[in-house]
Image (tube, grey):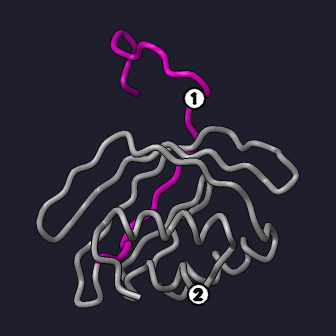
Amino acid sequence: MAFETAIAAHEAFYQALGNADVELMTQVWKPVDDSVCIHPLWPPLIGHRDIFAAWKGMFQASPSMTVETEIICEQSTAHGCLHLVNETLISALGQTSSPVVATNAYELTDNGWQMVLHHASPTAVESSDHANQPLH
């Protein structure tokens, strides 16, 4: 399946995540050794093999969930696209995860738009004024 737009790849990624669909997830990702996936509080997974070993394990542990997303920033060029996304994951038992923010990068390939980076990190429950706080 070729994704004609970065948004189509984005939607397929979150559909695959919600349905624990390894096959669809495989189609979303560009199958290269330099793709990167960082799950919240995990070390970086680099390369197709390591990324999919993790997805398979996660999907076996949690076969389905509801995934709510909001793209809060998008930057795109003719051949690349970055999405900054608020994610809310709700388990099949109705448990809501802590808020997560993700950066997703998509690249226009010969097979349509494909993901090359997913970096998800926990974030604060509520936004606050950070302008007067130290950066580090």
Q: Image point 27% across, 48% down: which residue?
A: 74
Is mark 1 in CB contact (under 8 Å) with mark 2? no
Q: CA distance from mark 1 to mark 2?
A: 33 Å
Q: Position of residue 52 (x, y in %)?
A: 58, 82
The quadrant the C terminus occupies is top left
In the rendered image, residue 100 lying in the magenta stretch gets the answer no
Residue nearest the observer in this picture, 33 or 95: 95
In the displayed orientation, state which residue is furthest to the left.
78
User: Element at badge 1?
Assistant: loop
112 up-or-down from 98: above or below: below
94 up-or-down from 17: above or below: above
**Amino acid found under the numbered disc labelled 1:** Ala
Residue 3 is drawn in which quadrant? Answer: bottom left
Q: Which residues are magenta?
A: 113-136
Q: Image point 88% across, 52% down: which residue?
A: 93
Q: Which residue is mark 1?
A: 124
**Amino acid found under the numbered disc labelled 2:** Glu
Residue 14 is drawn in which quadrant? Answer: bottom right
Q: Is residue 119 left or right of residue 51?
A: left
Residue 23: mark: 2
Q: Image point 24% across, 84% down: which residue?
A: 109
47 up-or-down from 20: above or below: below
Residue 18: mark: none
Q: Is residue 10 left or right of residue 59?
A: left
Residue 51 is drawn in which quadrant? Answer: bottom right
Disc with the residue nearer the chain's start (1 vs 2): 2
Q: Nearer the viewer, mark 1 or mark 2?
A: 2
In the rendered image, residue 129 lying in the magenta stretch gets the answer yes
Q: Image point 83% across, 57% down: which residue?
A: 92
Q: Position of residue 119 (x, y in %)?
A: 46, 57
In the displayed orientation, state which residue is furthest to the top.
132
Residue nearest the observer in this picture, 82 or 93: 93
